[in-house]
Image: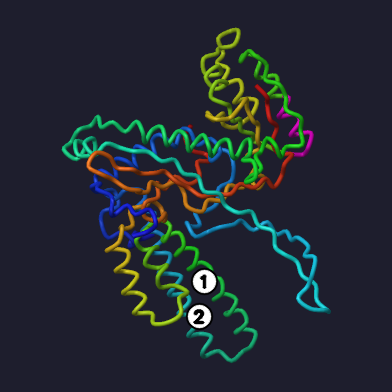
Amino acid sequence: MNHLLRSIAPISDDGWKMLDDEARDRLTPALAARKLVDFSGPHGWEYSSTNLGRTASLGSAPCEGVTGLRRRVLPLVEVRADFELAVEELRDADRGADDADLEPLDKAAHQIAVAENIAVFHGWHGALTGIGEASPHDPLPLGPKADNYPRPVAAAVELLLHNGVSGPYGLALGGDQYQQVAQTAEHGGYPLLEHLHKILDGPIVWAPGVSGAVVVSLRGGDFQFESGQDLSIGYTSHDGQAVRLYLEESFSFHVATPEAAVALSA
Amino acid sequence: MGFDQYHEPPEELPAATRTFARLCASLTEEAEAIGWYEQRIAVESDPDALAVMRDAQGEEFKHFSMDLEFLLRRAPAWREIAQGILFQPGDIVEHGEEAEAETFEGDGADGAGGYPAGSLGIGSLKGAQL
């Protein structure tokens, strides 16, 4: 048994499969960062830091005749979303009910996906630097109307090309912006989504939690998401009415090429 | 070309199982090559020939290790047992027995693609259907 303590939860094997499948179904569409940045791992729950290859000076040495440096590393962060399920719902699912109420799990899955997206695209104060805040380029305004989005997206692509950052490019669109784009057909009925795709030569992803949008190069090597423990469901406690569980992951995120992205402000 | 790596009719096997079988066959071939080079090196006296064969055997070490890593990523239980045995000092058989017991008497290796038990196995979604 590992630290997730799943085997002592009052949940059957079929019940765990149902919960894992539900979580996977909810998480996969919302995990925008993983669709655009490099991913390494998972390296395990014990994995604690990412090597940056950098050092910091030390003010002193143990004795005369030597010098010392301290390695700088990027510590992993842990993200956890707790939720609670009714025991009765799990029992009914074991009996074959196909409409078990898993809404608390769905909400936790959405929240942890939002947290991951925000951390990667906007940063996590004191913990991680996000793509948008690392970028040296001034954010380009998206403007209020979705049918004008091709202009700033094309400008962002041109800016990246001008800086020697090759494509293809991907676009992470915040929830509101994605909805507008998906609903919009430009003059002549051409779907906006298709037009943006032609400009980018890459995917347009729904990124709940992101404010505005971010254009990133997909050439690889610019943005590194390092997974310690990938998203997992663990067990906390239970009583006669409820089982308390959590979704959890550990990761670091490192921007190797800050100029390989352009933020688009809402 | 033969299709000896399949023990069951290939058309009845899922694509992932066929890939797994191909890599198992490749792993076997690399292990055989390592053994052959070991024997040739043991009897060769020409230093230039020895250097060439040592270099070639090094390639087979690499190929074997790559095949093994691929297979371990695809077989969580195998990976979990291997983690208890490989690169561990001490009694190999003892580690083997312990690793097997921990794998099959614990949570079980229910993760996907080399992920530990309990993981949802999501990993990278780059290139995934949006």
Q: Position of residue A129 (x, y in %)?
A: 66, 43
Which residue sits at x=34%, y=79%? Answer: B94
Which residue sits at x=51%, y=66%? Answer: B63
Determine contact: label 1, label 2, CB under 8 Å.
Answer: yes
Which residue sits at x=46%, y=44%? Answer: A80
In the displayed structure image, the side of residue A222 where residue A181 appears, left or right? left
Location of mark 1 (residue)? B60
Give, as a three-letter code, the residue at label 2. Answer: Tyr
In the displayed structure image, the side of residue A78 where residue A255 appears, left or right? right
Quarter of the image with the C terminus of chain A is top right
Q: For the magenta stretch, what is the residue range?
A: A155-165
Q: Residues within 10 Å of mark 1 (few under 14, many from 20)?
A: many
- Determine which of the numbered discs, if any, sits on residue A173 in the image: none
Q: Position of residue B112 (x, y in %)?
A: 38, 51
Outermost residue, top direction?
A188
- Determine which of the numbered discs, if any, sits on residue B37 in the image: 2
Q: Tell me if residue A44 comes above or below residue A105 in the rendering.
A: below
In the displayed structure image, the side of residue A258 where residue A249 appears, left or right? left
Q: From mark 1 to mark 2, how far is it between C-alphas?
A: 9 Å
Q: Main secondary structure of the magenta part?
A: helix
Give, as a three-letter code, the residue at label 1. Answer: Glu
Q: Nearer the viewer, residue B112 or A132?
A: A132
Q: Nearer the viewer, residue A109 or A41?
A: A109
Protein chain holding label 2: B
